[in-house]
């Protein structure tokens, strides 16, 4: 309401925000208690005049419907493709068989949707996965039928591809997280691969998750939905449990044929194993490596990168701390010692503050140290590493040792002959509600790169065999694990059965904010509790200095004491909770502007809200 200001000028005649995208942005803003402006900043890429001046190619006619191919291995797999080709809107949670065929299977689902005259959107967690689906689509359909939207493309090429989708020249999109808002015309299928990967969660406000955005799009556009992965998240299991989607799985005989043999090593076996006491690898692991190297490469997954990420006193086991900021000391490579928080090098001879000892021992051994140990044990075999600093896309099928951190495993030609999953306690012991689910997801991802049991593929996991995630890996039953997790969370009232919001802010700000918010009557407030004081990332200007920044977007400012409260509501009240928090933040934000940043209103205006937090402890 009110008078409108006159336009000062038109930057571009190109329409980039249609009614469909605007409606989706409003729905996402309401779902995550955010502002429309924040969502539009995520949905519409920055303008590039050079790309805008180039015309987009003419759209190609719809292709022929593909045959089922490897979808025949799944119960109702061929029927799912047939429904897409016939213009239907099936919704499925797909538990993919291990092996290299998942990218080609996604490509066939896209081709079947294009054959019906509709568009398709596929969201994957990283550029390597996008490149595999891109290659599969090109091999199946040829050039010019799909667009690849990833950050690696650069701003001009990415905007040119985005404009081709917006103009209707291209009906299929494959991309990473930001592609969830791609303006595909006549949308017939939205698909997400590996929805449990943290890369699907947007770090910038209002921090939407790609899976939930695609669920909104499927409901709004009445199109098909496909959530696929070698594992199964609790959220995907809930979609099946509520009847919103149907399971798309293979029969057990197909699973036994495609999956490798999984063997476990628990604490009892480690205690009785002479080799395990002298080194990190027990006898069974050494045997698996030796046998695997006879026929191909062997994958070794290590949960920690670096050389020795954590150190402690050899005599009293007290963690080694930095003398400047009390951060944990680490050895990035042999002969070096520095702080993992402030990055300062430990000069002089270190000594323990508790017992006065001068010798250090490794609490956690990283991928680089593991590669060094394996290189000494197998001197005639090449050792390659893949991690955050240098990620390998693929390795040849020749005998070699490939040491990788979780998520950075390269694909081996013909598959790995064996795989070792080390230090399972490091992933299972994290104080996180999703620790077991995340550990199983990473193990399944690595094990799916190994040859099937019929070809001699073997996986050895060093973890307690009685734990539920380990048993799910041995049986290759991610769906059963997700169902059990879902039932337990339902009993405890944890997400995704309930809806939850995290409210963060400075001390004495969260409580008054929640007191003034008109929360639903069935809302339950947990906390607030103090958060650990954030430390700066390595290379920042001092601990809490002017150039210091938090480790992740959305974390509290460096050096400030913040607290967090969790607000939980039962199913059906999630929209009311988001609306109440959004309204309260708008009111307090306006009060903060009127009162100035230094007053109480300014402190309350700093309160941050996250719906469905990924980490609730």
Image: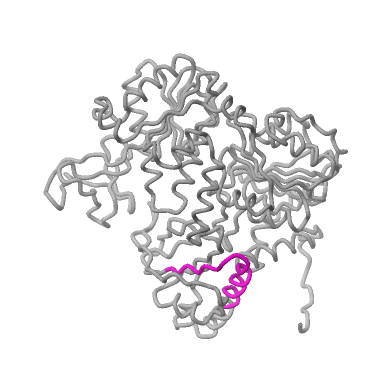
Question: In the rendering, at what x and y percent does residue 517 appear?
Answer: 54, 79
Please give left or right for residue 73 compared with residue 591 in the image: right
Question: In the rendering, at what x and y percent does residue 413 appear?
Answer: 56, 22
Location of residue 99 by image quarter: top right
Question: In the rendering, at what x and y percent does residue 241 appear?
Answer: 62, 51
Location of residue 100 by image quarter: top right
The N terminus, quarter of image: bottom right
**Magenta stretch: includes residue 65:** no
Residue at coordinates 38% horizontally, 51% vertically from top-left?
538
Q: Nearer the viewer, residue 613 or 344?
A: 613
The C terminus, quarter of image: bottom left
Q: Nearer the viewer, residue 241 or 505?
A: 241
Location of residue 588 by image quarter: bottom right
Residue at coordinates 32% horizontally, 23% vertically from top-left?
283
Q: Is residue 227 positioned above or below 78 on the image?
A: below
Question: In the rendering, at what x and y percent does residue 42 appear?
Answer: 64, 58
Q: Is residue 440 positioned above or below 326 on the image?
A: above
Q: Is residue 456 positioned above or below 602 on the image?
A: above
Q: Is residue 32 positioned above or below 513 on the image?
A: above
- Give the magenta range: 564-584
Residue at coordinates 31% horizontally, 22% vertically from top-left?
376
Q: Is residue 160 visible?
A: no
Please give left or right for residue 583 compared with residue 261 in the image: right
Please give left or right for residue 32 compared with residue 604 in the image: right
Residue at coordinates 24% horizontally, 49% vertically from top-left?
319
């Amino acid at each position: 309401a009110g008078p409108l200001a006159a336009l000062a000028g038109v930057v571009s005649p190109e329409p980039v925000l249609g009614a469909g995208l605007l409606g989706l942005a409003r729905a996402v803003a309401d779902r995550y208690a955010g502002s429309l402006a924040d969502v539009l900043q995520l949905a519409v890429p920055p303008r590039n005049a050079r790309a805008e001046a180039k015309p987009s190619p003419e759209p190609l006619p719809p292709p022929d419907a593909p045959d089922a191919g490897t979808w025949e291995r799944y119960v109702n797999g061929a029927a799912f493709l047939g429904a897409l080709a016939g213009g239907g809107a099936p919704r499925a949670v797909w538990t993919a068989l291990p092996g290299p065929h998942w990218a080609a299977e996604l490509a066939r689902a896209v081709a079947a949707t294009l054959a019906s005259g509709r568009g398709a959107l596929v969201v994957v967690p990283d550029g390597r996965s996008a490149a595999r689906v891109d290659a599969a689509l090109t091999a199946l359909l040829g050039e010019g039928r799909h667009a690849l939207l990833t950050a690696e493309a650069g701003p001009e090429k990415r905007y040119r591809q985005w404009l081709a989708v917006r103009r209707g020249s291209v009906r299929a999109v494959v991309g990473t997280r930001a592609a969830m808002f791609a303006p595909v015309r006549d949308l017939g299928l939205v698909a997400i691969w590996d929805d449990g990967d943290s890369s699907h969660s947007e770090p910038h406000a209002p921090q939407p998750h790609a899976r939930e955005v695609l669920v909104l799009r499927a409901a709004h556009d009445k199109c098909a939905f496909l959530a696929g992965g070698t594992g199964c998240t609790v959220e995907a299991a809930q979609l099946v449990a509520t009847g919103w989607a149907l399971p798309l799985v293979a029969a057990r005989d197909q699973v036994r044929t495609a999956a490798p043999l999984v063997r476990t090593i628990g604490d009892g076996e480690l205690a009785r194993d002479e080799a395990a006491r002298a080194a990190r690898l027990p006898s069974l692991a050494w045997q698996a490596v030796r046998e695997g190297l006879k026929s191909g490469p062997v994958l070794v997954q290590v949960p920690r990168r670096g050389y020795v990420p954590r150190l402690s006193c050899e005599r009293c086991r007290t963690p080694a701390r930095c003398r400047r900021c009390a951060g944990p000391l680490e050895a990035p490579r042999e002969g070096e010692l520095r702080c993992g928080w402030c990055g300062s090098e430990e000069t002089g001879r270190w000594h323990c503050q508790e017992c006065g000892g001068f010798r250090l021992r490794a609490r956690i051994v990283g991928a680089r140290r593991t590669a060094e140990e394996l290189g000494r044990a197998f001197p005639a075999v090449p050792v390659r590493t893949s991690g955050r600093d240098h990620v390998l896309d693929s390795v040849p099928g020749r005998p070699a040792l490939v040491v990788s951190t979780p998520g950075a495993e390269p694909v081996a030609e013909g598959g790995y002959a064996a795989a070792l999953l080390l230090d399972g306690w490091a992933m299972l012991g994290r104080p996180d509600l999703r620790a077991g689910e995340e550990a199983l997801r990473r193990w399944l991802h690595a094990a799916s790169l190994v040859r099937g049991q019929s070809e001699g593929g073997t996986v050895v996991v060093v973890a307690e065999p009685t734990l539920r995630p380990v048993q799910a890996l041995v049986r290759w039953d991610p769906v059963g694990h997700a169902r059990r997790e879902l039932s337990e969370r339902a009993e405890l009232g944890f997400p995704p059965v309930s809806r939850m919001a995290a409210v963060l802010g400075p001390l004495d700000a969260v409580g008054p904010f929640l007191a003034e918010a008109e929360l639903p009557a069935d809302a339950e407030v947990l906390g607030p509790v103090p958060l650990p004081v954030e430390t700066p990332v390595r290379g920042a200007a001092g601990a809490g200095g002017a150039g210091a920044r938090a480790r992740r977007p959305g974390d509290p400012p460096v050096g400030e004491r913040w607290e967090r409260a969790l607000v939980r509501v039962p199913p059906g009240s999630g929209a009311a909770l988001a609306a109440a928090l959004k309204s309260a933040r708008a009111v307090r934000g306006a009060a903060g502007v009127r009162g100035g940043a230094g007053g109480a209103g300014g402190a309350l205006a700093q309160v941050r809200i996250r719906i469905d937090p990924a980490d609730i402890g």
